[in-house]
Each structure stands twice: as structure tokens, then as C-alpha cells.
Image (spheres, rainbow, N blue to C red):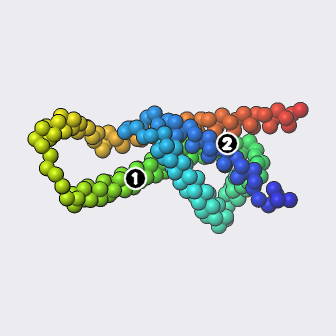
Amino acid sequence: MVSNVLPLRTVLYQSVFLLIAIAIEATVLYRLLDPPPTPKQSIQYATSINLLCTVVGWLFFFVFYGIATALPSAWTTRFETNLVQFIFFDRWTSETATTLILLSLIMFFASFAIKQSGLIGLRWLLEAGSKKEDKKTAEELAETPIKTNPSPRRVIQDMRYVEPPEKVPSERLSRRAQARAVLSANAWSFSAISALLILRFAFQSTLNLL
């Protein structure tokens, strides 16, 4: 009774696909992002952008469903019925499969745009917070009185160990590298989820024929 009211199967599939996408995209982002993040940061990046993409996708679905319901058209009524039956009740036809192929292409590029924008915003927020903390630490060190004057010999020794400044890549090259990393991560996760869906449908069709 509960499964007929609540789309538990849809929630389960969404959770599994989300975990698969996070695992795959975290690995790809860890290998391709420039500057390279830590493993923990790559997992945080992948989790944040996939959750953002999921929330935006469901919001768009309900908005689109509300608009399609208000349109007095037989085609939109049939389309929304097939879509709702597939998403919530796992019932699909050949017409639904054709529509899903077209929607998959749109979803791929839309999810890439959302993830790219989300990652840009996330990294900007993290960098802004890090710069704020560094500035605060520098101000605290500047306000700390120096009790003893270092000897010239100590100053020369400290100068020998000063690391040269790192070359900071330009913003344009960094954005291009990030776009390539996000596109590759999105492609790998989409391919894996699509392969799982195809195997599932093939297995289900085989069981129906037996």
C-alpha cells in the first residue's frame, strides 16, 4: 500500500545513482582539476554539485509538470502521463523510451552547466573564506610585539629557506581546465548510470519473456 502512494523505488534508484555519480566524479575531479584538490575536497566538490544538480532537476520537473498540466493539449497530457508513470511507477513504453533518449541529451548538457556553475561558486566561496582567515592571521601576527631582535646571521639563514613564489595560473586557463574536468566527470557518471539502466531494462525484458 505504501509503495503505491510513495515512490519508494524512485527514491532508492535516485539514492543509488547519486552515490555512483559522487564516487565516479570525485575520482575524476581529483585527477583532472587544476590546482589538484585533496581527496577530501574532491569528494566534497562532487557531493555538492551533484546534490545541487538533483535539487534543480526535481524543481524543474515539477515546474514543467505544472506548466504542461495547464496546457490544453493531448500531446502534453500523454507526454506528462508517460513521464510520471516512468519516474514514479517504473512503467514505460516504446514512446517513453524515445522521449527519454531525447531528454537524456538535454539533461547531460544541462547538468554539466549546473555542475560547472556550482563548482565555480563553491571554489570561490572556499577561496574567499581562506583568504579571510589568512588575512586575520596576518593581522594577528603583525600586532604581536617582537621581544627579541634576531641576529643578522639568523636573518641570513631564514632568507636562504624562503621558497620562491608559485606561479599562479591565469583565471582563463583555470576555468578551461575546470570545465574539462567537470565535463569528463559528468560524461563518466552519465555513462555508468546509462549502462546500469540498459542492463536493468534488458534483464527486466528477459524476465517478461520467460
Of labels 1 and 2, the one closer to you = 1
Question: Which of the image's four quarters has the N terminus?
Answer: bottom right
Pointers 1 and 2 in contact (C-beta within 8 Å): no
The residue lying at 74 percent from left, 42 percent from top is 94
Q: Nearer the viewer, residue 155 or 60?
A: 155
The residue lying at 58 percent from left, 39 percent from top is 23
**Whether residue 106 is situated above or below residue 73 in the rendered picture:** above
The residue that disc 1 covers is 126
The residue that disc 2 covers is 98
Residue placed furthest toward the right: 210
The residue lying at 29 percent from left, 59 percent from top is 136
Disc 1 to disc 2, C-alpha distance: 42 Å
Tally the numbered discs: 2
Of label 1 and label 2, which has the lower sequence position? 2
The residue lying at 70 percent from left, 52 percent from top is 11
With 147 as the anchor, is 74 left or right in this view?
Answer: right
**Whether residue 67 is situated above or below residue 200 in the rendered picture:** below
Q: Which percent across, then down, holds residue 20?
A: 62, 40
Instruction: Identify the amino acid type marked 2.
Output: Thr
Q: Nearer the viewer, residue 154 or 189?
A: 154
Instruction: Identify the amino acid type marked 1.
Output: Leu
Residue placed furthest toward the left: 152
Q: Residues within 10 Å of mark 2 (few under 14, many from 20)?
A: few
Q: Nearer the viewer, residue 199 or 85?
A: 199
Is residue 110 visible to us here? Answer: no
With 126 as the anchor, is 150 left or right in this view?
Answer: left
Q: Which percent across, then down, holds residue 108?
A: 54, 43
With 127 as the anchor, is 81 left or right in this view?
Answer: right
Question: Which of the image's four quarters has the C terminus?
Answer: top right
Q: Which percent across, then down, holds residue 32?
A: 43, 35
Q: Which percent across, then down, holds residue 47?
A: 54, 48
Mark carried by residue 180: none
